[in-house]
Structure formats: C-alpha cells, structure tokens
Amino acid sequence: MFDVFDLSRVLNRSITQLCKADHQDDPQAIAQWTANKDPATIRDWITSGSQIWLAEHAGKVAAVGGVRGEEITLLYIDPDHTGLGIGAVMLKRLEQELLDSGCSKGYLQATRTAQGFYLRYGWKATGQCCERKDLSCFAMRKSLHPAD
C-alpha cells in the first residue's frame, strides 16, 4: 500500500508550482484547487472505487495518476521530476487501464498548463468543461483504439 501523504504532497506541489498559468499565483484559487488533495480525501477516493496509480523515481513518488470509469481523473507530476518522460509513461499506463477495463474512448479535463501535453499524445479538445465552469479547464477525449 502506498502512502497517501506522499500522493497528497505531489498533488499539492504540482498544482502550486507547475500550474501557475491556471491559478496565476492567486492564494484563494490555489487553496480552492488543493482543498480536496489532502490524505483523508485521497483515502476516500481509493475506498470509493477510484484507481490511483503512482510512479516512483529515485525512491520518491514522482507522479500520481487516477482513473474512474472512462475518465482519467488525475495526472500530476512532482516539480522535481518534470522533463524525464514520467508523465508520458503515466499517461500511457492510464490509457491502457481504460482500454483493459473495456473503454473504447477516454475522457479527461485538462488544465491550461497540461492541455498541450495531452494534445501531443493524441487527445482532442471537445470544449470547455461544463461541470466546473472554469475557464482554464478543457474537456478532452481520445479514441483508445488506433485507426486501422
């Protein structure tokens, strides 16, 4: 079993340090975004059926990914581990998990910071996210079956 405190740390560091294009260093926006990234909430995600994945590098948690149903719900990289390809490996793992569970398409809600990353890996923007009504949230989807 992994440590929910390490996962919480990665989520919060990634949001705070890497997602400045989204929160503009606004303390209130950061607090709102990280409010549900505490260890107790992460434990609840796991017990409620979300699948949480982590990647380690040099003995430390470097990335956190999550899947629920047809959706990738989390993909965050620790700032000390960017540029190493860990995000790409985690994305591939999450896509494979969706495929293995019978999904033909995957869905996610990307931040402004991450949208370019997903586009590079074949994800398509479908419009603004309606659920959060957040201008920096972009709905995306991808066919998980390569074209013949």
Image (cartoon, rainbow, N blue to C red):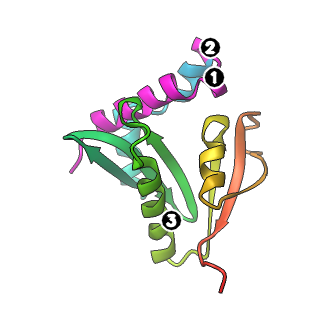
Q: Position of residue 46 (x, y in %)?
A: 37, 51
Q: For label 3, count other residues whose C-alpha is less than 10 Å away and answer few (under 14), some (14-19) or many (20+).
A: many
Q: Nearer the viewer, mark 2 or mark 3?
A: 3
Q: Position of residue 3 (x, y in %)?
A: 24, 40
The tag earlier along the polypeptide, 2 or 3, is: 2
Inspect the magenta stretch and tell me whether residue 129 lies in it. no
Query: In the rendering, which numbered label is found on residue 108?
Result: none
Three-letter amino acid code at the position of disc 3: Glu
Query: In the rendering, which numbered label is found on residue 95?
Result: 3
CB within 8 Å, label 2 to label 1: yes
Q: Position of residue 98 (x, y in %)?
A: 50, 69
Q: From the image, tell me which residue sits under label 1.
A: 23
- Which element is circle 2 on? loop
Dominant SS of magenta comes to: helix
What residue do we see at 50% from left, 23% from top? 16
Query: In the rendering, which numbered label is found on residue 26?
Result: 2
Q: Which residues are magenta?
A: 1-28
